[in-house]
Structures are given as C-alpha cells and as structure tokens.
Image (cartoon, helix red, strand yellow):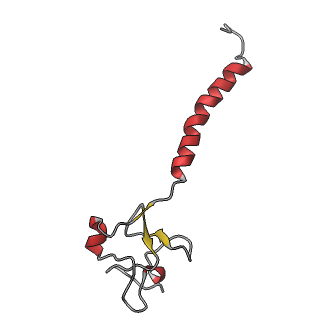
Amino acid sequence: MNSGRSPTRRALLKILAVGAVPAALWRASSAAEPAKLDVQDPAAIAQGYVENSTVAGANCENCLQLQGSAGARYRPCSLFPGKLVASSGWCKSWTPEI
C-alpha cells in the first residue's frame, strides 16, 4: 500500500469504476419507458378508461390531462402517474383542452 503517498493511478481508476457501474445502471433503468395502462387496472376501471374512444370528438389526444409529445400513440396522463394511456383512449375524467 502507499503509506503517506498519493494514490496510484490504478487505485484511482478502481474508485472511478466502482462509482461508474451504479450510475450506468441508474441511467439505463431511468430511461425505460413507463408501462401502458391496462384497462383492467383498478384505477382505469374506476375512471372508465378505454383505449379507443367511442365518444365523438373526445379522446385522450384532446384532453387537458394528457402530457408528453403530441402525436405519440401512448402518452403520460396526470390521472395515471407512471403509466401511459392511448392517445385514442377516453375516460370519464376527460377534460377538453382550452
């Protein structure tokens, strides 16, 4: 060991490598896309969520609750945190965009 001396380059590389592995794993897991909301999910059932709206002129795409990038088939919704809803979907909390 290096008693009293500065650490070797090899020791520094080991320290950096140990910190880099968890950081790389965290980035990979945080980049994963959220799951799509299942119509059988209790929250979806409570809101009457369907993936294909039958209500004329009302769907998730034109709802105030929908988030994310326009044009995507599935997007986040403020009513169902951590889940993606179908842009063509609908639920009873649909609120028209102003």
Horizontal side, residue 23 vs residue 75: left or right: right
Q: Horizontal and vertical percent for residue 9?
A: 73, 21
Q: Looking at the picture, does residue 27 appear above or below residue 22?
A: below
Q: Nearer the viewer, residue 3 or 29?
A: 29
Q: Nearer the viewer, residue 41 or 27?
A: 41
Number of marks drawn: 0
Q: Horizontal and vertical percent for residue 25?
A: 54, 41
Q: Horizontal and vertical percent for residue 38?
A: 35, 66
Q: Looking at the picture, does residue 91 appear above or below residue 10?
A: below
Picture quadrant of residue 21: top right
Q: Nearer the viewer, residue 42 or 81?
A: 42
Q: What is the residue that sits farthest to the bottom in this orientation?
A: 56
Q: Looking at the picture, does residue 9 appear above or below residue 29?
A: above
Residue at horizontal 55%, vertical 53%?
Answer: 31
Residue at horizontal 53%, vertical 44%?
Answer: 26
Residue at horizontal 48%, vertical 70%?
Answer: 75
Picture quadrant of residue 10: top right
Tell me the quarter of the image containing the N terminus. top right
Residue at horizontal 54%, vertical 73%?
Answer: 72
